[in-house]
Image: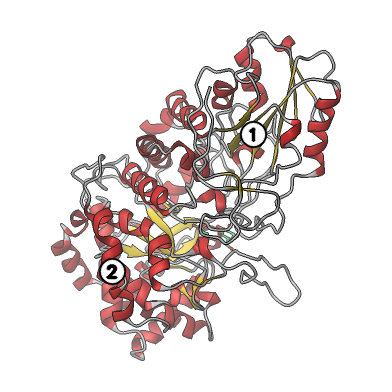
Amino acid sequence: MQTSRRQFLAGSLSVMGASLYAPSIFSTQWSPRLLTSRDAEVRALLARLTLDEKIGQMTQADQMYLESLDDLQKYHLGSLLNGGDSDPKTGNDFQSWRDMYDHYQARAVATDPRIPLIYGVDAVHGHNNVIGATVFPHNIGLGCTRNAELVEKAARITAKEIRATGINWAFAPCVTVPQDIRWGRTYEGFSESPDVVKTLGEAAVRGLQGAALDNPLSVVACAKHFAGDGGTVFGTGLQRGKGAEHFPLDQGDTRLSDADFRRIHLQGYITTVAAGVATVMPSYSSWNGVKCSANRVLLTEFLKGELGFQGFLISDYAAQKELPGNAKQQIETTINAGMDMVMVPDNYREFIALLKELVNERRAPMSRINDAVTRILRVKFAMGLMDPKRSQLADHGLRNTFGSPDHRAVARQAVRESLVVLKNDGTILPLAKNARLHVAGKCADDIGNQCGGWTVKWQGESGNVTTGTTILTAIRKAVGSDAQVTYSRDGSGAQGASVGIAVIGETPYAEMMGDRTDLNLAAEDVAAVDNLKRAGIPVVVVLVSGRPLVIDDVLPKAGAVVAAWLPGTEGDGVADVLFGAFKPTGKLSFTWPRGSSTSFNLEDPGYQPLFEFGYGLSY
Ligand code: BGC
Ligand code: BGC
């Protein structure tokens, strides 16, 4: 192991102090101690469980790999998830999701010991897998709002929409602190700055979990990916098989001293644990060559020891398979490092058999199993899952709140507060409502593009993937007359308009596939701007992207540039800023580099940004 306990803890004390103990302005009565308040019942239940039942509690299968419904009972599975592309068998609509949940949960509680499932989903910007959900801006945009109260509110709404489908656990918030924007998960982070991440991450936990976990509108939150997922060194990322795809940053190695690791990458865990986050997901990535899911210092000594984390650790998707050794050794390593529940996600029968062998051979101590199951049951008790009088099925009365106008109004607010005006020559913005506008670009009329990855599909998808308002539709609504607004994807035919609006940027991606070595605009995007320019009109560029892109060449051609990030379903928030119904307040949560410079952060040698961290104009 790379770090001795003493070394690691020694570096810590000075850095932690203030932030951990300073009372938050959102202080509720929630305290992590509440998690343990029913430990007497937990102990009593634990004492009744067989080894098989305990191991079952430590197992999470992806529902799409469930071999038979009977396995829920036969293997005493403690948890199910829907992975990014793991859809209900009947479709991705609300009804299918709710029926799916009820179907599994009803079975899980049908026989002794009647321990309901904790059921997880990647609701990372709203209940985003489900068609028709309110989809909020991805975290990179929320970071630009610097508005913790708003982030808490958005998370509260997300929790409610999740609960409407019955599900009770979100794999969110992601409190990564991305240091290299070429990483495909940059947008999942609130900011490159640990200060922004720790404040907004804490707010998101409060929103998801509410004042108490047993509130029927709360879900269990999960701080991820612990830790240093955003600090990997370029070139150390995942290599899949010989000659296969290589992702330069994702799941790579973060090479930092204890002090720097703590100062940058652990801050979001210090605040979310203090706010009572009930689960934490160790990262696929490594820290100084050791996979986080094998790192006892990090999982057990730091998180459970020093921070006093009382909840449980859920592994990342099949993360144990990336550890050295055979399947059995991999399980041995991660369990002994402190992993409590393993997201298997497919071969759960094998996992259960191997873990049982490890216990019987004393390679996985019974004390470790008991610790893991205590933590899992503790969370289940805190959620009210163990209360016999309470139905664990979905509350059908919540149907009408799902994707409701009220929820969308908050998402719209989040969009307008997340927009960052990077350039505004003269008074081109705000646009006059009586202007004749020509709108162009591949992201102008594409709800899939504006939602990005982790929307309906794991990697996201261009096109009409869910219900919402595209930016083009929002512009038309704002001016109140369709005749005034023309549109062509490539920007042709803009003659006669007084202003052109190019909505350009990225198409959806998520982990792995989103890693890019160069962040240049696509030729199609540059052409759309050029075509508008050719009509002799001023051009407003609206960028839809999961990170800053190379815009040096487009910048001089544009009269105004607005970074809209991945705003989600509520395009109206973009129109609010363009037409001045809302005076922009967004501030960059990431440095915007010059050209293709790879000096991204203040601390990088040669730092010379195009727009500095914190930059943002108003009217
Ligand atoms: C991702 C996690 C996600 C999990 C479950 C993993 O591949 O890294 O962020 O929560 O899958 O879908
Ligand atoms: C799943 C995701 C998961 C990813 C990890 C995908 O097939 O749908 O949930 O994060 O695999 O490799």
Crowd band around label 1 with a 10 angstrom C-alpha radius: few (<14), some (14–19), many (20+): many
User: Is 366 drawn above or below residue 389 in the view shown?
Assistant: below
Report the disc number at residue 304: 2
Q: Residue at x 45, y 32 (%)?
A: 402
Q: Residue at x 62, y 46 (%)?
A: 548
Left/right of residue 361 with respect to residue 49 in the rendered view: right
Image coordinates of residue 66 in percent, x first then y, are 51, 62
Crowd band around label 2 with a 10 angstrom C-alpha radius: few (<14), some (14–19), many (20+): some
Q: Nearer the viewer, residue 144 or 393?
A: 144
Residue furthest out toward the left? 40
Q: Residue at x 49, y 51 (%)?
A: 122
Report the disc number at residue 166: none
Q: Nearer the viewer, residue 239 or 354?
A: 239
Mark 1 vs mark 2, foreground winner is 2
The amino acid marked with disc number 2 is Lys
Is the CB of mark 2 within 8 Å of ligand 1? no
Residue furthest out toward the bottom? 361
Left/right of residue 366 with respect to residue 553 in the rendered view: left
Of callouts 1 and 2, the N-terminal one: 2
Mark yes or no: residue 182 visible: yes
Q: Nearer the viewer, residue 456 or 29?
A: 29
Report the disc number at residue 447: 1
Left/right of residue 526 with respect to residue 138 in the rendered view: right
User: Is 364 drawn above or below residue 387 in the view shown?
Assistant: below
Q: Quadrant of the N terminus?
A: bottom left
User: Is 466 drawn above or below residue 44 in the view shown?
Assistant: above
Secondary structure category for the residue under label 2: helix
Image coordinates of residue 382 in percent, x first then y, are 23, 53
